[in-house]
Amino acid sequence: MQFFVDTADVGEIKTLAETGMLDGVTTNPSLIMKAGRPMLEVIAEICSIVDGPVSAEVTAIETEQMIAEGRKLAEIAPNIAIKLPLTWDGLKACRALTADGHMVNVTLCFSSAQALLAAKAGATFISPFIGRLDDMGLDGMKLIEEIRAIYDNYEDLSTEILAASIRTTNHVQQAAIAGADVATIPPAILSKLIHHPLTDKGLDQFLADWKATGQSIL
C-alpha cells in the first residue's frame, strides 16, 4: 500500500518525506486555506519535495472550466494529479484530462457505483471517503471492499483505490486489508502508525538489561 499525506503544510511534508515512507500528497481547497499562501506557490513547493503524485484540486464546477484549471495545475510539475469532483461535469473533465496524459484523482466518492463511473472515465485514482460515511452511521470500509471487488472483476479497469477521510490508525490497517492501493492520511495519524505500547515497553527492558551488562558496542 502506498502512503500519501493529506496536508498542504510544507513543514509537515518535509518531516514525513525524510522517513522514506511518503509516496505522495493530497491537498484540497480547505487545506490550502489553512496554509495561508497562494495555491500555485504551495503546490509547486510540495512537488519539489515529493516525487510521487501530488493532488491539486480544481475549484470550477463546469466541465470546460475544470479542464482549463486542470491544465493550468498540470503545468506546475509532471507529478501533479488533477483532483476533480465526482459529478457528471467532473467525469467529462476527467476523460479529457486523462486523454491529455495527466493523472486525475476523482474525489468525494461515496458509493461503488460512483467509483465504477470514475474508472470508466479513466481516473488514475478514486477517493472514497471512509470517515464521512462512518459519521453518518454507515460502514465506510465496506465501500472500499465493494470497490475492490468491482475493479477486480474487470481487467481493463486500472483506477487505483485511494482511501480518504481517514480518521484513525485502524482505518489505515482496515483499508490495507480491504485492498486499497493507497491511503491518504493526516500527518498526526501517519505519525501514530509507528507507536505501540508493547514496543515501548520491550525497548525499555532491552535498554535496561544492556545497561546492566556494563558493555558498549562502540
Image: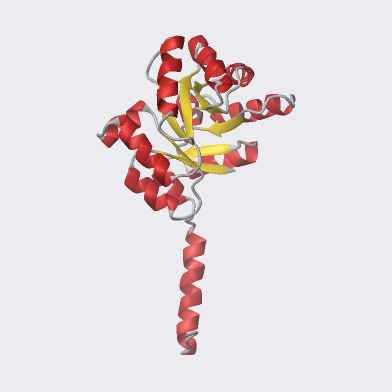
Task: State the scheme by which the image is colored.
Answer: secondary structure
Please name the residue shown 38% across and 52% down the image.
15
Residue extending farthest left? 36
Residue 38: image x %, image y %?
27, 31
User: Foreground residue, 83 or 114?
Assistant: 83
Please name the residue shown 42% across and 17% down the image.
68
Residue 167: image x %, image y %?
45, 37
Q: Quick check: 32 above or below 95?
A: below
User: Foreground residue, 202 or 186?
Assistant: 186
Residue 35: image x %, image y %?
28, 36
Instruction: Tell me how many marks there are.
Output: 0
Specify the quadrant that holds the N terminus: top right
Q: In which quarter of the image is residue 181?
A: top right
Residue 32: image x %, image y %?
32, 31
Left or right of residue 56, residue 103 in this image: right
Left or right of residue 9, residue 125 in this image: right
Q: Quick check: 116 above or below 34?
A: above
Residue extending farthest bottom? 214
Q: Quick check: 179 above or below 137?
A: below
User: Foreground residue, 27 or 74?
Assistant: 74
Left or right of residue 18, residue 171 in this image: right
Please name the residue shown 49% across and 88% down the image.
213
Left or right of residue 46, residue 53 in this image: right
Please name the residue shown 48% across and 35% down the image.
78
